[in-house]
Amino acid sequence: MANYRRLRAKGGTYFFTVNLADRSSRALVTHVDDLRAAFAIVGQRRPFLIDAVVVLPEHLHTVWTLPEGDCDFSTRWREIKTIFTKRCALHPARSPSKERKGERGLWQRRFWEHLIRDEEDYRAHILYCWGNPVRHGHVARAVDWPWSSIHRDIRLGRVPTELGAPVDGQFGEEV
């Protein structure tokens, strides 16, 4: 079994990229209410702060801050994936390997994470989340994508409504 090296910082802030196995799927936006419910259920069991999130059809990006003394993001992701998969009741084709391991086959097995280093890194990853729908050609401006925390942050006065988040840098995905 592979031993993946993950930098674990108790109370750390992390950027994540999580993908569906089928990169042509639209399941995340089609079943976004199930995804929201999965985040809420896990957040009640194992609290964490969602600093930013953007949900695209087949992948999502998010920035989380974990509670002081806690660095267990892997369990949270496992639970979110499991709850979402059960709630949306999708049954994609599975590889023999996923069948042997009892996996439903909806998600890629792993996720990409990055420990945020400083305020500049934090801001860059928040902007990356917001700008990702623009980068993928889904919308012309970040505020036009409905499944983004940019709307929450506009309501809270953290960002101007006319923001069209810049799209630069590569954080965890190939295009």
Image (tube, grey):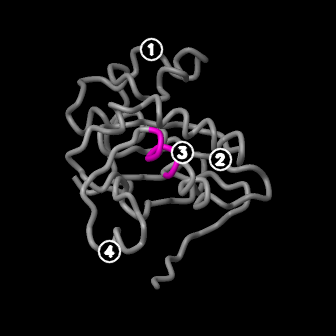
Compared with 117, 26 (above or below) is: above
User: Residue tagged by mark 1?
Assistant: 161
In depth, the one of 136 and 47 nearer the eye is 47
Please say whether residue 124 is visible from this viewpoint: no
Cα separation, mark 2 vs mark 1, equals 24 Å
Q: Amino acid at mark 2?
A: Thr
Considering only order in the chain, which callout, 4 or 1, is on the residue closer to the N terminus? 4
In this view, the mark in front (3 or 4): 4
Cα separation, mark 3 vs mark 1, equals 21 Å
Q: Count every numbered label the image shows and give the total.
A: 4
Considering only order in the chain, which callout, 1 or 2, is on the residue closer to the N terminus? 2
Cβ atoms under marks 2 and 3 closer than 8 Å: yes
Q: Amino acid at mark 3?
A: Val
Q: Does the magenta run of residues contain 155?
A: no
Compared with 133, 63 (above or below) is: below
Q: Position of residue 108 (x, y in %)?
A: 36, 60
Q: Residue at x 44, y 60 (%)?
A: 111
User: Residue tagged by mark 4?
Assistant: 97
Q: Residue at x 30, y 44 (%)?
A: 58
Compared with 115, 166 (above or below) is: above
Residue 65, labelled with which disc?
2
Residue 16, labelled with which disc?
none
Cα separation, mark 2 vs mark 4, equals 33 Å
Q: Residue at x 52, y 22 (%)?
A: 159
Residue 63, labelled with which disc?
3
Quadrant hosting residue 158: top right
